[in-house]
Image (spheres, rainbow, N blue to C red):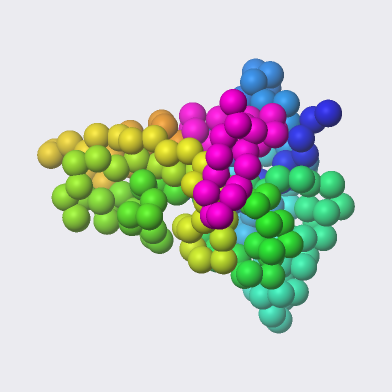
Amino acid sequence: MLLKIGVLVSGRGSNLQSIIDNIEKGDLNCKLEIVISDNKDAKALGRAEKHKIKRKFIDPAEFTTKKKYEDKMIESLGNKGVELVVMAGFMRILSPYFINHFENRIMNIHPSLLPAFPGLDAQKQALDYGVKISGCTVHFASEKMDDGPIILQRAVEVKEDDTEEKLALRILKEEHKILPEAIKLYEEGKLEVKNNKVYINK
Ligand code: GRF
């Protein structure tokens, strides 16, 4: 059985692309049922279109409350039977209501080694701090931003002459590997969450 996934995006969609590519190569046994964006100009929507994937722009401004907006997302994901939700550059904080609806079934990718540097501009935060190693994290989403049980992390060297762009690119290359890897582990039923920690069953 193919795992039904839904991807939430806001922008460029390079992580979405890596999921699409891994599905098309046959490395992921998933069906990408729907891509939902909160931004109508997201490049990610064009990528979905190109690969004939159902896509939907849900405009948060059209809803009077966050709950109504999230209910619309829950309905769209539910109608497609989505089992796993992947936040791939989705720039909106989800409420506990949404998170609890999909408990331990929402993955997020973040460009730092969490719990260091959550929030916006994680690569700039790493440069400003002067860390020698940064990286990326895939985790299950919790009620707090960029928090929750960690599934996979990959370390990346921070170089002395790095700019934000250079570091972001180096990290992004690893993001494109660990997000599909994490989805694959989920799809194979190998992830177990106990006491806020993820155990990977071999
Ligand atoms: C990535 O760096 C991701 O870790 C962060 O937002 C960025 C999205 O990039 N959450 P893209 O839209 O997947 O290209």
> Would residue 66 appear left or right of 78 to someone viewing this image?
left
Examine the structure image and report whether residue 162 is included in the region drawn in magenta: no
Quarter location, residue 40: bottom right
Image quarter hosting the C terminus: top right
Along the line of sight, the residue nearer the viewer: 60 or 7: 7
> Would residue 117 appear left or right of 39 to someone viewing this image?
left
Along the line of sight, the residue nearer the viewer: 95 or 79: 95
> Would residue 123 appear left or right of 40 to someone viewing this image?
left
Instruction: Please say if 93 is above or below 161.
Output: below
Extreme-left residue of the structure: 160
Residue at coordinates 75% horizontally, 74% vertically from top-left?
68
Examine the structure image and report whether residue 198 is included in the region drawn in magenta: yes
Instruction: Please say if 71 is above or below 106.
Output: below
Q: What stretch is highlighted in magenta?
A: 176-202
Quarter location, residue 72: bottom right
Extreme-bottom residue of the structure: 64
Residue at coordinates 49% horizontally, 29% vertically from top-left?
177
Point out residue 82 in the picture as x, y percentages from the top left corner: 78, 46
Residue at coordinates 71% horizontally, 45% vertically from top-left?
84
Residue at coordinates 86% horizontally, 52% vertically from top-left?
79
Extreme-front residue of the structure: 195
Point out residue 124 in the picture as x, y percentages from the top left corner: 27, 53
Q: Can residue 160 be seen in this view?
A: yes
Image quarter hosting the N terminus: top right
Q: Can residue 109 be seen in this view?
A: no
Instruction: Please say if 132 is above or below 42.
Output: above
Extreme-top residue of the structure: 25
Point out residue 14 in the picture as x, y percentages from the top left corner: 51, 38
